[in-house]
Image (cartoon, rainbow, N blue to C red):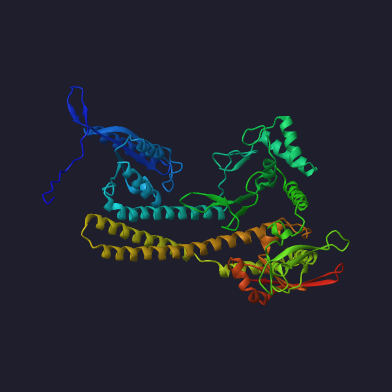
């Protein structure tokens, strides 16, 4: 037992027989993966060069056997979901068809840290190596997992920065009225290749006009679908089957009256590229008279009022209309002075001669112990709002002069743009230092890990701080664009208004008024925002402060129907 003999069993080398009948070592099955993320000419040149270079390299190596070149063109590296060639390569590896994958760098392989490590580990278990040329790393060495984590994280951070820059550029274009419009499957319009503007298609425009004409004449979406199908009309997607949702989409699409609302949806995750409806996530940009309309504005607005009236019939037994956010002028913008909650639209004595619509604090609705504020008469607020719009804005040019002066004082100066450029440069320098540090670790294996991690964490912390500064500066610049856009919209509305306001239009009212503070049943404060955009929590916390600001105008309205007098003040916040 003490004289044990240990035999070493070496891996069996596989051989294949050549044309001469001689047995030679089997060739390693090699493929390459190439990717560029955009379709511009420079990237296309790089893409072709990668494919050509790897093809020559593999074919010139006598110990390698070419499998194929896998190449994705014009696709993002943050997600592998839509990268067909990448997924085909992984599937071929799983089927035992590949021994070695060549790729230019980690960022070309994938910029998602989790995906990168998961694929590397899976391929490692399958006996498939990956060679990252730029970093000079083979994935088969488990010691490089740590470095791969860091380097793929850097690549992921770079992707996040690119995503933020793209968002910023798009929002800036939006704020300057430069439209980004998708005209595919869009009934009635095409896009002029030179001007990039929407241009009506006469044959399809007639279908859109017919839809609006039918709807304002009292015919519902379901019946309209039947009539269109009977005539053989095709949808924007080229189908002859019409759905109610298609009709509703057309009826509510502002583009048909010549306007354009941009950033209705937004990408919330730069890794998954998932887009969601922009419900108070980011600013929207409304451009009036952007292109030639198919429907006149009066018909379009009439269709919207009919849609609202029809919606009222399906509200529900509780009649708590405030839950249908932004359907009404005051939804979500009247703040209770006592508790800071939002007032809700409520029916009192519904179905009786004394029925009335009230605006009541949400806290009171849930229980008097939460708030004891009295409800306000909806008609009194509507009357005060119309009177305020006419006396403070339509019939008083001095108000707009005051607003312009206030906006100018609060305007973010160009130094913020200069600061943003400087911050971006500093961030890039820090990222370069981080990359150099990683390169040093690769080239100097003896570099103590604690020294490396200390420097790495310090640089990473500085980069995060710099990103926070960049985000804060971008937010300030975006506020500037929003405020200038808001003032421009006010001027356009007043320029078109040849007579006093007679109806309380939702979009018009919300252009001029930011929030309303319900001080009591007999007193409210209209707030015009000139300095900042506040979250619900921020505005609620500062409601007392805002309610006592100096007023630029005062007014009173008496509703004899309810024996109610409502005083209002207008304040700039």
Q: Can I make out residue 42 in this image?
A: no
Query: Residue at left 49%, top 55%?
Result: 168
Instruction: Answer above or below: position of 471 versus 89.
Output: below
Image position of 410 (left or right of 374): left
Count of number-bearing discs: 0
Image position of 131 (left or right of 21): right
| Of the pair 416 and 325, the residue shown nearer to us | 325
Name the quadrant of the C terminus.
bottom right
Q: Quadrant of residue 538?
A: bottom right
Q: Which x, y percent locates residue 175? A: 56, 55
Q: Quadrant of residue 335?
A: bottom right
Residue at the front extreme, as displayed = 1
Image position of 194 (left or right of 248): left
Query: Residue at left 72%, top 34%?
Result: 228
Residue at the top extreme, as displayed = 20
| Of the pair 319 and 481, the residue shown nearer to us | 319
Instruction: Answer above or below: position of 180 versus 480.
Output: above
| Of the pair 131 and 366, the residue shown nearer to us | 366
Residue at the left extreme, as displayed = 3
Q: Can I make out residue 522 in this image?
A: yes
Q: Which x, y percent locates residue 419? A: 44, 65
Query: Residue at left 40%, top 51%?
Result: 114
Q: Which x, y percent locates residue 512? A: 68, 63
Image position of 468 (left or right of 524): left
Q: Which x, y percent locates residue 184? A: 58, 39
């Amino acid at each position: 037992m003490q004289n044990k003999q240990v035999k070493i069993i070496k891996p069996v080398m596989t051989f294949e027989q050549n044309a001469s009948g001689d047995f030679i070592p089997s060739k390693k099955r090699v493929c390459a993966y190439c990717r560029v993320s955009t379709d511009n000419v420079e990237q296309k040149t790089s893409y072709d060069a990668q494919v050509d270079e790897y093809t020559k390299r593999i074919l010139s190596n006598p110990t390698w056997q070419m499998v194929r070149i896998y190449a994705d063109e014009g696709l993002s590296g943050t997600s592998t979901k839509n990268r067909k060639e990448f997924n085909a390569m992984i599937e071929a590896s799983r089927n035992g068809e590949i021994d070695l994958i060549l790729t230019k760098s980690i960022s070309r392989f994938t910029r998602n840290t989790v995906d990168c490590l998961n694929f590397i580990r899976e391929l490692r278990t399958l006996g498939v190596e990956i060679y990252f040329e730029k970093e000079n790393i083979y994935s088969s060495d488990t010691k490089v997992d740590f470095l791969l984590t860091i380097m793929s994280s850097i690549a992921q951070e770079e992707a996040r920065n690119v995503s933020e820059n793209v968002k910023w550029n798009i929002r800036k274009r939006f704020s300057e009225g430069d439209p980004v419009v998708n005209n595919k499957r869009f009934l009635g319009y095409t896009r002029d290749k030179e001007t990039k503007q929407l241009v009506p298609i006469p044959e399809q425009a007639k279908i859109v006009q017919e839809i609006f004409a039918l709807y304002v004449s009292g015919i519902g979406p379901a019946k309209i679908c039947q009539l269109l199908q009977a005539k053989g009309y095709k949808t924007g997607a080229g189908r002859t089957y019409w759905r109610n949702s298609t009709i509703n989409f057309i009826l509510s699409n502002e583009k048909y009256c010549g306007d354009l609302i941009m950033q209705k949806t937004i990408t919330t995750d730069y890794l998954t590229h998932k887009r969601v409806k922009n419900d108070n996530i980011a600013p929207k940009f409304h451009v009036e008279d952007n292109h030639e309309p198919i429907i006149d504005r009066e018909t379009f607005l009439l269709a919207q009022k009919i849609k609202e009236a029809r919606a009222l019939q399906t509200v529900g037994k509780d009649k708590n209309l405030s839950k249908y956010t932004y359907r009404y002028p005051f939804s979500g913008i009247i703040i209770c002075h006592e508790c800071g909650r939002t007032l809700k639209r409520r029916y009192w004595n519904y179905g009786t001669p004394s029925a009335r619509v009230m605006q009541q604090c949400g806290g009171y609705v849930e229980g008097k112990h939460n708030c004891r504020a009295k409800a306000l008469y909806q008609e009194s607020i509507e009357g005060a709002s119309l009177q305020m719009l006419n006396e403070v804005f339509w019939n008083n040019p001095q108000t707009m002069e005051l607003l312009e002066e206030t906006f100018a004082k609060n305007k973010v100066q160009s130094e913020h743009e200069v600061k943003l450029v400087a911050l971006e440069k500093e961030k890039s320098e820090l990222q370069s230092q981080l990359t150099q540090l990683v390169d040093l670790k690769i080239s100097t294996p003896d570099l103590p890990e604690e020294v490396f991690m200390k420097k790495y964490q310090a640089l990473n912390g500085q980069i995060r701080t710099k990103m926070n500064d960049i985000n804060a500066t971008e937010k300030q610049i975006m506020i500037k664009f929003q405020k200038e856009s808001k003032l421009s919209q006010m001027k356009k509305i007043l320029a078109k208004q040849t007579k006093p306001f007679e109806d309380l239009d939702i979009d018009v009212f919300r252009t001029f008024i930011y929030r309303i503070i319900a001080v009591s049943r007999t007193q409210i404060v209209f707030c015009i925002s000139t300095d900042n955009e506040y979250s619900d929590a921020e505005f609620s916390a500062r409601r007392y402060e805002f309610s006592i600001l100096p007023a630029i105008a005062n007014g009173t309205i008496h509703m004899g129907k309810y024996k109610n007098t409502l005083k209002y003040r207008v304040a700039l916040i």
